[in-house]
Image (cartoon, grey):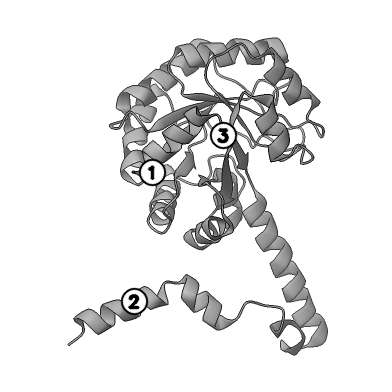
Amino acid sequence: MNKNRVLRDALSSGTLFTAMSAHNPLAAKLAEEAGFGGIWGSGFELSASYAVPDANILSAGTHLEMMRAIAGVVSIPLIADIDTGFGNAINVSYVVPQYEAAGASAVVMEDKTFPKDTSLRTDGRQELVRIEEFQGKISAATAARKDQDFLVIARTEALIAGLGQAEAIERGLAYEAAGADAILIHSKQNTPAEVLAFIEAWPGKVPLVLVPTAYPELTEADMQALGKVGIVIYGNHAIRAAVGAMRKVFAQIRAEGGIRGVDGDLPTVKEIIQLQGDEYMRALEAKYLR
């Protein structure tokens, strides 16, 4: 079964699908190793890895090529974060087939203006496009895909923008009507109350997608019990873990004037070589080098 069908079946199964963020192939391999169902090809994480804001500073090509690299090293589905679709509905028509060809099994597109501002930034510029305009972008995306198992997930930022539950419900239903396979509802409140109220009121037929960055106390068991959530995305934990670990190690090396104190706590070079696929390369050498 291909990755697209795996994700499509998971979404319709009633069982919560888990996706961990990744900003490079190594992070994706570690997420697969840990047992996550899929990879979230995070625009926030990739921007952070380049040390630039998550505001469409990086080109679509940079993100696309990273998604291609990630998809090539994991056997689980990749959900690509394409922000606002890198433009209008015409851009979306061209972009979606490229992500599908690169190995993604889904795209998530949000209803903010281009260029966007990151959702969780304090006092960020959260401007939404007209409902009809975003419906056109969704329809363009679904028409452009080659495989009907490839998912188009619509993300509404109505709660992020402070427009309230009624607006979020209206937009979600409109996006479902335009052909979205799922609706991602996002909130930056530090408790899950706002999202839970939305879920309880949600009258749509397609599943919901959550990104519980701001309200970490909501567990997978809690989400499963709600009965309407199909996917949970851990949106930025790979880059936060990497930054935290590097800061700690770098500071210790400077404080101690050497690496003797940190070396025993780090993965061995042998482990890194294994993650690089050394065993496979050695097998190729044995088979083909003359």
Q: Is residue 28 left or right of residue 169?
A: left
Task: Identify the element where label 3 is drawn.
Answer: loop
Residue at the spot of label 1: 3
Tell me how far mark 1 sits from mark 2, CA to CA. Answer: 24 Å
The crowding category of the residue bearing disc 1, from other C-alpha atoms within 10 Å (few below 14, some 14 to 19, many at least 20), is many
Query: Residue 86 at x, y = what percent?
Result: 45, 34
The crowding category of the residue bearing disc 3, from other C-alpha atoms within 10 Å (few below 14, some 14 to 19, many at least 20), is some
Look at label 2 and name its amino acid. Met
The structure residue drawn at horizontal position 37% and vertical position 37%, both measured from the top left corner, is 5
Tell me how far mark 3 sits from mark 2, CA to CA. Answer: 37 Å
Residue at the spot of label 2: 281
Numbered label tally: 3
Q: Quadrant for the N terminus, please.
A: top left
Look at label 1 and name its amino acid. Lys
Tell which tag, 3 or 2, sits nearer the viewer: 3
Q: Is residue 121 left or right of residue 228?
A: right
